[in-house]
Amino acid sequence: DTAVSQTPKYLVTQMGNDKSIKCEQNLGHDTMYWYKQDSKKFLKIMFSYNNKELIINETVPNRFSPKSPDKAHLNLHINSLELGDSAVYFCASSQGALNDLEQYFGPGTRLTVL
Amino acid sequence: RKEVEQDPGPFNVPEGATVAFNCTYSNSASQSFFWYRQDCRKEPKLLMSVYSSGNEDGRFTAQLNRASQYISLLIRDSKLSDSATYLCVVNMEGGGADGLTFGKGTHLIIQP
């Protein structure tokens, strides 16, 4: 009964490959997010989806594309992986996107690009 | 420029001591403030929200100083299990998820 789950937990791949990370939340939340935490532990928001619509998109390369088949899922697809994409990617969700911003994070996906 | 700054530490504190650290933010229009805790190789988890009047949850006290644009976290009677990285989170746009900015975290080590 994990609230926010991600798969896979670890992903090791070669440069140039395309990969996807899946995220699911069973909290009934309206908004889901993807964060990147780099080697310096800096956590930076990449995307968020509210009611299946993208509401923010930070300065993220267009090789990254979020896909939300329904309110409970927000997957992250990455094309043409680069060395600099190596990081831990966290999915999160929250109820609403205004005042109630408590976020529940998934366990993270550790991506290593060789 | 959006900025949330924290002293990265590490803060090495003996068990039972009181420790406090601050987080400064650059946007005076920020309205929402939070402290998250992140254990090594784990996901961040909400520790507490920070209200204008300050708030307390057990051994933890959070305060907001709007005039000086910082929030603080005080931990009393520290436990070994308090060892973690504490992330300051500020809504920099004055409302909404698009301005949510995380600090780089303060690493706290409680020593026996």
Image (tube, rainbow, N blue to C red):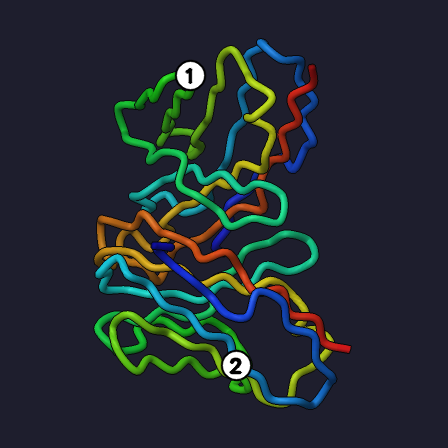
Q: Find disc 1 in the rendering and name its residue.
A: B59
- Figure label count: 2
Query: Is B58 situated above or below B1?
Result: above
> Which one is nearer the viewer's eye here, A113 or A41?
A113
Q: Position of residue A49 (x, y in %)?
A: 31, 72
Q: Position of residue A55 (x, y in %)?
A: 30, 72
Amino acid on which the number 1 mark rests in the picture: Arg
Query: Is A60 situated above or below B44?
Result: below
Secondary element under disc 2, as helix, strand or loop, is strand
Q: Where does the C terminus of chain A fall, quadrant-wise?
A: bottom right
Going by the image, does B64 lie left or right of A98?
Answer: right
The residue depicted at 23 percent of the width and 56 percent of the height is A95
Q: Position of residue A10 (x, y in %)?
A: 63, 67
Amino acid on which the number 2 mark rests in the picture: Ser
Q: Which of the numbered marks, if any, corresponds to residue A20?
A: 2
Query: Is A81 situated above or below A37?
Result: below
Distance from the alpha carbon under mark 1 to that under mark 2: 41 Å
Q: Quadrant of residue A113?
A: bottom right
